[in-house]
Amino acid sequence: MASQLRTAILVAARSGTVASFMREYGMRLGASRFVAGETLDTAVAAVRRLNEKGLAASVTLLGEYVSDQAHVERVVAEHEAIMRRLGHERLNANIGFKLTNVGLSINEALALENSDRLARLGESLSMGIRIDMEESFTVDATLRVYRALLSRGHRDVELALQSYLRRTEADLRALLPLHPKVRLVKGAYLETPDVAFPDKRDVDAAYLRLLELALGREAYVCVATHDDRLIDRALALALERAVPPTGFEFQMLYGIRQQRQVELARAGHRVLISVSFGPEWYPYLMRRLAERPANLFFFIGNYFRR
């Protein structure tokens, strides 16, 4: 049932009617719980509040599939401005982005050069970068860009790997000799069953296999989940393998399981919160609703309380 509801939400997200309604009313109905506003000022304020609770942050300017080169340059410049602002304010934060937002929709070489540009700026600010994983047809190019960045000496570059893709275990095994920094996520794009596991139980089982494969081994693992069963397994595995709290981290999304975020941080673990903002928040929000359909009822309740 959960997988059917997830698919229904992702299909509905493509509807122009749904998109128009959500863009007009979404923030008032509760999108602001999951999206840190539409401006850099609101995102910075959110990061500051998180830092005050002992939580790190990763800031993402929402957007994807930019296919005009001049637009890509503007997006990259915006990312540079975000990084400088975070550095100037001495916030405990890094920056995340999608390769299709920095040139991959035009060509792979452009995405690499722009990612390299952001990585170099990050190093000058003692700030890492995070590369998101997108639909399955972008995976090969994303992996090539990541490998190229490592070969250029950029070490504080994190790559998301999606457990719902059938190929991901093999991808992780191939990356391990490079001592990567990987963020394990479940995945939220609409894919066909031959590409991605349609059943949540299989997605969770795949996540556990990735965790077992990488934690305390050749990778720095970012355990990006709100699932207590997966969190508890990561904690147990770290204990079994004598992985110190500095050897891995937990990551969660802005606005979700806030008490658990603080509990993990108070227990001595590094906890990083993904803070997304910007006017292009609609696709992001719909993927978050699909990942956790219970959040849909939060919106429905707010609608009827208007």
Image: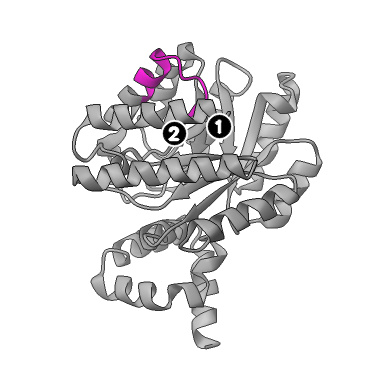
Amino acid type at image mark 2 = Leu
Question: Image point 66% across, 52% down: which residue?
Answer: 48
Q: Which mark is residue 161?
A: 2
Amino acid type at image mark 1 = Met
User: For the image shown, how many numbered marks are present on the structure?
Assistant: 2
Q: Relative to 236, is 284 above or below?
A: below
Q: Position of residue 75 (x, y in %)?
A: 33, 46
Look at the image and say whether residue 143 sits in the magenta stretch: no
Q: Position of residue 136 (x, y in %)?
A: 29, 38
Q: Please tell me which of labels 2 and 1 falls first in the chain.
A: 1
Name the outermost residue toward the front: 88
- Quarter holding the N terminus is bottom left
**Does the rendering let one see residue 218?**
yes
Q: Relative to 160, is 67 above or below?
A: below
Answer few, some or many: residues within 10 Å of disc 2's Cα (few below 14, many 20 plus, some between 14 and 19): many
Q: Which residue is mark 1?
A: 127
Q: Which residues are magenta?
A: 146-161
Q: Position of residue 222 (x, y in %)?
A: 58, 33
